[in-house]
Image: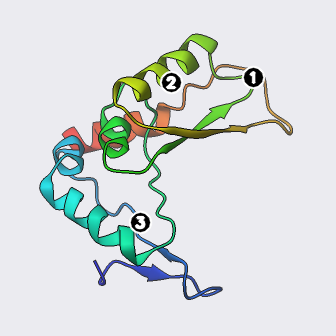
Amino acid sequence: VEQVLQRSPIDDSLCIITAGQIPPDPTKLLSSRRMQTLIEQWHPQYDLVIYDSPPVLGLADSTLLANLTDGMVLVVGLGSTDRNAFTQAIDALKVASAPLLGVIANGVKGYVPGVYTGHSYYERYYKQASA
């Protein structure tokens, strides 16, 4: 972990680990005992650990992480997220027994009307992983 941990040049107490190479099976990696051990290791070391995960709907990654964390914050695009998809995402987190800590609404300033599902980046991510 120390080899991939990057410290912020602005504040030495802020650390980040980027995704790196796409693993062959992200779901297997996130549900592994090794991932659980890492999360347990980080919990007492840091005041706050944030995991940026793919959309809740359509992929298992977020709900797998939710089971290992203290809660989830859902990011929703105003004017672009379908109300049914939002409700389904909340329901999925409830099924996963993940506490929903809050919702961040983005896309307020200068948003361009249209449909954005948030899956386009992650579709590329998984297509690369399976290639």
* Measured Cα–Cα span from mark 3 to mark 1: 29 Å
At x 57%, y 11%, the residue is 84
Locate residue 97, reporting x and y percent. 36, 32
- Regarding mark 3 in the picture, which secondary structure is present there? loop
Specify the quadrant of the image occupied by residue 83. top right
Considering only order in the chain, which callout, 1 or 2, is on the residue closer to the N terminus? 1
Label 3 is placed on what type of residue? Thr
Amino acid, disc 2: Ile
For mark 2, give the secondary structure.
helix
Left or right of residue 85, residue 56 in this image: left
Q: Label 2, label 1: how many angstroms apart (C-alpha)?
A: 18 Å
Residue in front for this viewpoint, 37 or 23: 37
Q: Tell me, yes or no, if residue 57 can be seen here.
A: no
**Mark 3 vs mark 2, CA separation in Å:** 27 Å
Give, as a three-letter code, the residue at label 1.
Answer: Gly
Q: Residue at x 43, y 31 (%)?
A: 56
Give the mark nearer the N terminus: 3 vs 2: 3
Question: Residue pushed farthest right?
Answer: 110
Q: Quadrant of residue 106?
A: top right
Which mark identifies residue 90?
A: 2
Q: Which mark is residue 18?
A: 3
